[in-house]
Amino acid sequence: MPATRDIRDRDDLDVLLRRFYGAAFADPLIGPFFTEIAGTDLELHLPRITDFWERALFRTAAYGRDAFAPHAGLHSARPLTAAHFGRWVQLWRATVDGLHAGPRAERAKAQGERIALAMLRRLAGPAPETGGGSGGFVPLAALRLRSVA
């Protein structure tokens, strides 16, 4: 059954993020970043990331953390590549689409892609595989996803 309602509130974000992280933790490409490298405790992580998304979509939560720092730490342990961020985008979009439809769901997907691209650029620096740090680069995995959807 297709999703028929938009993301309404923090409770919707909680369900969405639990489903997304369930898929991300189990994913063979990006799962090890959560489970082996970071040792992410979802119950500890979830309120923080829900604050992040609540602020991004509703402008209501106070999120004062540095979202980049943990990713930089992961990158120093094992490099994060366009394929990793592309897979993250693919899982994020599929999870949102599986649960919600509407303007906030579209904004969540667009924001997720912008965040992934910004993180990739910051982590990789100006290199050919990141478009030299200039605008317009989209991870190949995200392009493949769009062509299939």
Image (cartoon, rainbow, N blue to C red):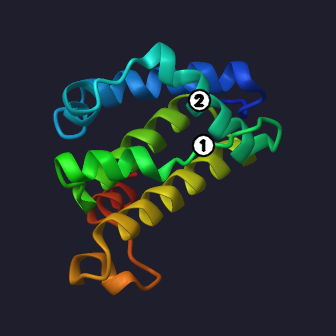
Q: Is residue 15 above or below residue 70?
A: above
Q: Residue at x 70, y 18 (%)?
A: 11
Q: Horizontal and vertical percent for residue 38?
A: 29, 31
Q: Residue at x 78, y 29 (%)?
A: 8
Q: Residue at x 62, y 29 (%)?
A: 50
Q: Horizontal and vertical percent for residue 114?
A: 52, 61
- Viewer-proximal residue, 104 or 39? 39
Q: Horizontal and vertical percent for residue 146?
A: 39, 59
Task: Specify the amino acid type for callout 1.
Answer: Arg
Question: Label 2, on which residue?
Answer: 48
CB atoms of marks 1 and 2 within 8 Å:
yes
The tag on residue 65 is 1
Inspect this view and state whether residue 1 appears.
no
- Viewer-proximal residue, 101 or 142? 142
**Quarter of the image where one finds residue 15:** top right
Query: Is 72 on the left or on the right of 2, as rendered?
Result: left
- Disc 2 secondary structure class: helix
Could you tell me how far apart the alpha carbons at marks 1 and 2 are, in whole angstroms? 9 Å
Q: Residue at x 43, y 49 (%)?
A: 69
Q: Quadrant of the N terminus?
A: top right
Q: Residue furthest top?
A: 43
Q: Horizontal and vertical percent for residue 26?
A: 25, 24
Task: Specify the amino acid type for callout 2.
Answer: Arg
**Quarter of the image where one finds residue 58:** top right
Q: Is residue 68 above or below residue 18?
A: below
